[in-house]
Image (cartoon, rainbow, N blue to C red):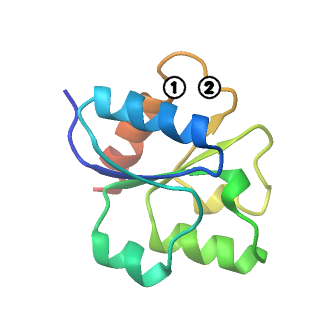
Amino acid sequence: MASGRILVIAPNGDLRASLVFALEAEGYQVTAKEALPDFSWVASQGFDCTVLDQKALSGPDYESIAFCVKAAPVVLLAARPFPWLVEWVSRIVEMPAIGNSMSAAVREAIRVHV
C-alpha cells in the first residue's frame, strides 16, 4: 500500500471527490482544494505530490509555472496540456483517465522526485 501526503486541486467537485477516493484507497493522505491555494501555504505543508487539474489554472502563465515549481512534483490532469506547462510538471495524465494511470503517475512522480 502506498503512503504519502497528496494535494489534489480540481475545480469540479465530482472529479475532486473521485480523485480523493481513489488516492485514499491507495493509502495516501489527501488534502483537496477547489482552487489554487496560496504559494506560502503549499510550501509550508510539505506535500509529497500535487495532483493538479489544468482547469484550475486561471491566472497568467508565469503564475501557473511558479505554482508548479513550488508544488513539485506535480501530476497534471489535462485533455490537452498547455505546451508551455509540460516541462514544469513531473507527469501528465490525459483526461479522461482510464484504469490505474492516476495511481501510477503519483507513485512515479514521488519516486523520481525523492
Quarter of the image where one finds residue 50: bottom left
Q: Position of residue 30 (x, y in %)?
A: 33, 47
Of the two numbered discs 1 and 2 in the rendering, the one whose residue sits closer to the viewer: 2
Crowding at mark 1 (Cα within 10 Å: few <14, some 14-19, many 20+):
few
- Who is closer to the viewer here, 37 or 86? 37
Q: Distance between the residues labelled 1 and 2?
A: 6 Å
Residue at the disc numbered 1: 101
Crowding at mark 2 (Cα within 10 Å: few <14, some 14-19, many 20+):
few
Residue at the image point whose x is 69% and y is 32% from the top: 95
Q: Position of residue 106 (x, y in %)?
A: 41, 40
Q: Which amino acid does label 1 sit on?
A: Ser
Residue at the image point whose x is 57% and y is 67% from the top: 36
22 sits left or right of 79 in the view:
left
Residue at the disc numbered 2: 97
Q: Are marks 1 and 2 in contact (CB under 8 Å)?
A: yes
Query: Residue 21, relative to residue 78: is it above or below?
Result: above
At numbered mark 1, what does the secondary structure look like: helix, strand or loop?
helix
38 sits left or right of 58 in the view:
left
Label of residue 10 in the image:
none
- Who is closer to the viewer here, 15 or 98? 15
Q: Position of residue 14 (x, y in %)?
A: 59, 35
Q: What residue type is labelled 2?
A: Ala
65 sits left or right of 99 in the view:
right
Residue at the image point whose x is 28% and y is 68% from the top: 46
Residue at the image point whose x is 51% and y is 71% from the top: 37
